[in-house]
Amino acid sequence: SLQTRITAQETQNKAHCGRLDTLAQDIENLNKKQADTVAALTEAKRKQLELAHRVLRVLVKQEITRKTGFTISCEEEQ
Amino acid sequence: FLNQATQVNAWDQLLIKNGEKIVSLNESVAAVRLDQQRLDHELDFVAAQQAELEDALKPLEASLANCGPVDTERE
Amino acid sequence: FLNQATQVNAWDQLLIKNGEKIVSLNESVAAVRLDQQRLDHELDFVAAQQAELEDALKPLEASLANCGPVDTERE
């Protein structure tokens, strides 16, 4: 019966080993996915900077236009 | 014999502990996977909003590009 | 007896190896989780900036929506 327990323990340990290999694979996959996420976030940050720059340019242009009375004449015509 | 029985008991304890740790590790991995999915969805959402903002920006840029030179001449 | 002792040692090593594997995998998961938190914060920042840009653009969109038709007629 001691031998039976030892055999059972061996089986159990083998099962643990297999489960750990699966988990190691899962973690590796998560690492790969995270690398993709990092790349996507980097692109989102780059796009954000570009958009912020373009919005600022449009706002500044509009301000100049407004000051020279362009927008006011637009509104008057309506 | 007694010594061997003690050894087997100790192994039992080790196996149980390992098993518990594996269950908890499994839960951690599942939680990380879920968080990863949430992050990806949020990123998709931000990218979609950026595309929307860019679409809104294009006609504004075009219309101000037309206004621009005229104003410069006026000044 | 010696053979049995060797077997016991080998078995001990196997159990310890699994325990070590668990520790190392736990560390990997913790590292992924830490990176996730950093990504989460950065993404929140980008999303907040995005909302700011949208807000900044709104009045301009409204004002140009009014002017729009007039400009087209002028051209």
Image (cartoon, coloured by chain):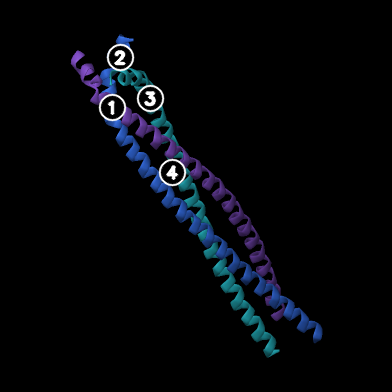
Chain colours: A purple, B cyan, C blue
Q: Residues within 10 Å of mark 2 (few under 14, many from 20)?
A: some
Report how far apart the C-alphas of labels 4 and 3 lie in the structure: 28 Å
* Residue hosting label 2: C71
Q: Are marks 4 and 2 in contact (CB under 8 Å)?
A: no
- Which one is nearer the viewer's eye here, B12 or B27? B27
Task: Check disc 1 and report its element: helix, strand or loop.
Answer: helix
* Residue hosting label 4: B42
* Residue B65 location (% of width, % of height): 37, 21
Report how far apart the C-alphas of labels 2 and 1 lie in the structure: 17 Å
- Which one is nearer the viewer's eye here, A4 or B64? B64
Task: Specify whether A2 is left or right of C47.
Answer: right
The circle on residue A47 is: none
Look at label 1 and name its amino acid.
Ile
Q: Chain of mark 1?
A: A
Q: Residue furthest left?
A: A76
Look at label 3 and name its amino acid.
Glu
Q: Earlier in the sequence, mark 4 or mark 3?
A: 4
4 or 2: mark nearer the eye? 2
- Which one is nearer the viewer's eye here, C7 or C30? C30
Could you tell me which residue is drawn at 41 percent across and 27 percent down? B55
* Residue hosting label 1: A64
Task: Specify whether B19 is left or right of C49.
Answer: right
Look at label 4 and name its amino acid.
Glu
Task: Check disc 2 and report its element: helix, strand or loop.
Answer: helix
Report how far apart the C-alphas of labels 3 and 1 lie in the structure: 14 Å
Instruction: Specify the quadrant of the image occupied by residue B8.
Output: bottom right
Q: Chain of mark 2?
A: C
Look at label 2 and name its amino acid.
Asp
* Residue C42 location (% of width, % of height): 43, 49
Could you tell me which residue is drawn at 63 percent across and 71 percent down? C20
Could you tell me which residue is drawn at 50 percent across and 58 percent down? C33
